[in-house]
Amino acid sequence: MTQENTEGHAADVVKAPGTDVHGTPVVSGMAYAPAMWVVRPDVPPATAPSIAEDKRDAEFARYQAAAKVVAERLTVRGDATIGHASDVLKMSASLATDRGIAKEVKVRISKQGLPAIQSLVGATDKFVTMFEKAGGLMAERVTDLRDVRDRVVAEIQGQPEPGIPVPTEPVVLLADDLAPADTAGLDPELIVGVATELGGPTSHTAIIARQLGIPCIVAMRELRQVKPGDLVLLDGGKGRITINADPAVAEDKVAKDHEWREKVRAWRGPAQTTDGHHAELLVNVQDGTTAAKAAQGQAEGVGLFRTEFCFLDAKTEPSIEEQTSIYSPVFEAFSHGKVVVRTLDAGSDKPIAYANLDDEENPALGVRGLRITGQNPELLQDQLDAIAKASQGHEGKSWVMAPMVSTLREAEWFTQEVRRRGMTGGIMVEVPAVAVMAEEFLKVVDFVSLGTNDLTQYTMAADRLSPHLAEYTDPWQPAVLKLIAQTAAAGKKLGKPVGVCGEAAADPILACVLLGMGVTSLSMAASAVSTVGAQVSAVSFSQCEAAAAVINDARDAKHARNLATEALGIR
Ligand code: PEP
Ligand code: MG
């Protein structure tokens, strides 16, 4: 937004004190501190004078040496970190020395005589275009590519490594978008809040902020209105930044938030509303390691075991024995708890070499999830056999569900396959077609679990990984809430369990609304369990029901969130 100043030049409008900027809330919590912008280095243009022929090998060696230093540095940081942060640092390290990029750099140096830096810029641009065209998870890696490029360029120039400067006092960090390697190093003592112009609720920024418990907002279109050094109040729960807020009000809100966070830290399950309604809180895991770690927390069981994550690098189908040994530790981690295993959700943003078609025009709408069974029926039979074997001796409930189901025939067939192996069979509700006919589907399955990430994507026709569509990929969208409510009502009528295992379950306010709708279990990242548990235990079930009823009138996601917050009597 610009306006004419007295000299007739366009100038940025700086927001008046006390005014607000809005975005999509990701991690709730309050922060009151000066704003610090992440400044991106200038990238030199991809054209420049030639390097003499006899100097080209040395120029390429200069690039290789710098890339190696950057990769090593990222690997060391990755080894010193755990969880998602460690994974993203190691992934960035492998990008620095990626053979495909190196090949492109070499061509530019040796054939065109371009200097190393310009060659890397040109090579990166080529991959950025390719990744953006591919969409989905590939497009998400564009930020990683650019970040790694900037690090290698700085190394070649002999400059300090770019990234987030370490502040000397607590700040609210602002950026267009954050690269995984940036977010992985955040210190929650100094970075007390994070806000980005781009990014979605499932971006790396969001995942790591959640893991570190840093209040976070994404998709703040007007974030540039906040200037470096502005004292800001960031409300992660409401998705709002107030510029130059009243200090007394801001400090009071931060103090109350700290009290709340103490409560969350001290919370011990099981979750129960103040009037005695039990909420079954479960975790989402991807292998035995994440399950064992989650078992140390307050969750009662596993609500979603994403089995495809075990095979992302596999070139051929693992044998039944191999699969059994991969699944068993998850059952062992929750030996008395419920374990819900999801069969391979291969395809779209999680392609698996041995399961998916090579080229699909539109993979999110293609042969993914249960649909891969059509071309390779053995794959599912083998996986179900392996799950059945792994669950033998498990004293808790062993449930198995299929992803990306869209017809009654699929639901009925899959459930029978699971039942005949002695387990409980269900489906995920990720496709609006299933929610619309929830009652019919529930009649033929033992349970359903709402995958709100995909359900939102397909209901709103918005790529869940796009950094530009956070407003649409918000599970608070009234149309999505209506589909969830309808499914929960059908479950209640038929007396069958209806869980939620998408990101919606990890939002403490939305979790209360879901319970009020009649959802019977909530499954989330392990890091979200205490926050959701403490919130559910602080309200009554009748408040949850009132919140679920009142959002029927919501006009948009923000309106729904506000109506629910009010009905729940939350800060
Ligand atoms: C979902 O779609 O909400 C879900 C839980 O599945 P995934 O995120 O693995 O697609
Ligand atoms: Mg899904």
Image: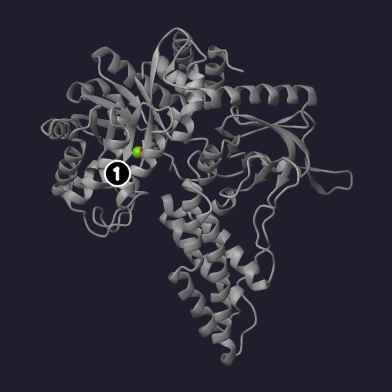
| The quadrant where residue 255 appears | top right
| Residue that badge 1 annotates | 307
Q: Nearer the viewer, residue 181 or 467?
A: 181
> In which quadrant of this rendering is ligand 1 seen?
top left
| Picture layout, residue 149 above or below residue 5 | below
Count all numbered tags in the image, as a single digit.
1
The spot of residue 164 in percent (x, y) is 66, 52
- Farthest right residue in view: 6
| The quadrant where residue 332 appears | top left
Q: Nearer the viewer, residue 562 or 366?
A: 562
The spot of residue 78 in percent (x, y) is 51, 55
Q: Is residue 117 left or right of residue 232?
A: left
Which element carries disc 1, helix, strand or loop?
A: helix
- Farthest bottom residue in view: 54
| The quadrant where residue 15 appears | top right
Q: Is residue 272 left or right of residue 342?
A: right
Whether residue 92 is visible here, answered yes or no, is: yes
Q: Residues within 10 Å of mark 1 (few under 14, many from 20)?
A: many
The spot of residue 250 in percent (x, y) is 74, 25
Q: Is residue 298 left or right of residue 447?
A: right
The spot of residue 321 in percent (x, y) is 18, 49
- Farthest left residue in view: 420
- For the N terminus, give its image quadrant: top right
The three-letter amino acid code for the residue at tag 1 is: Thr
Q: Nearer the viewer, residue 225 or 64?
A: 64
Confirm if mark 1 falls within 8 A of ligand 1. Answer: no
- For the C terminus, give its image quadrant: top right
| Picture layout, residue 123 above or below residue 568 | below
Residue in the picture at 61% in, 31% down: 236
| Picture layout, residue 393 above or below residue 314 | above
Residue in the picture at 35% in, 33% down: 451
Whether residue 375 is visible here, answered yes or no, is: no
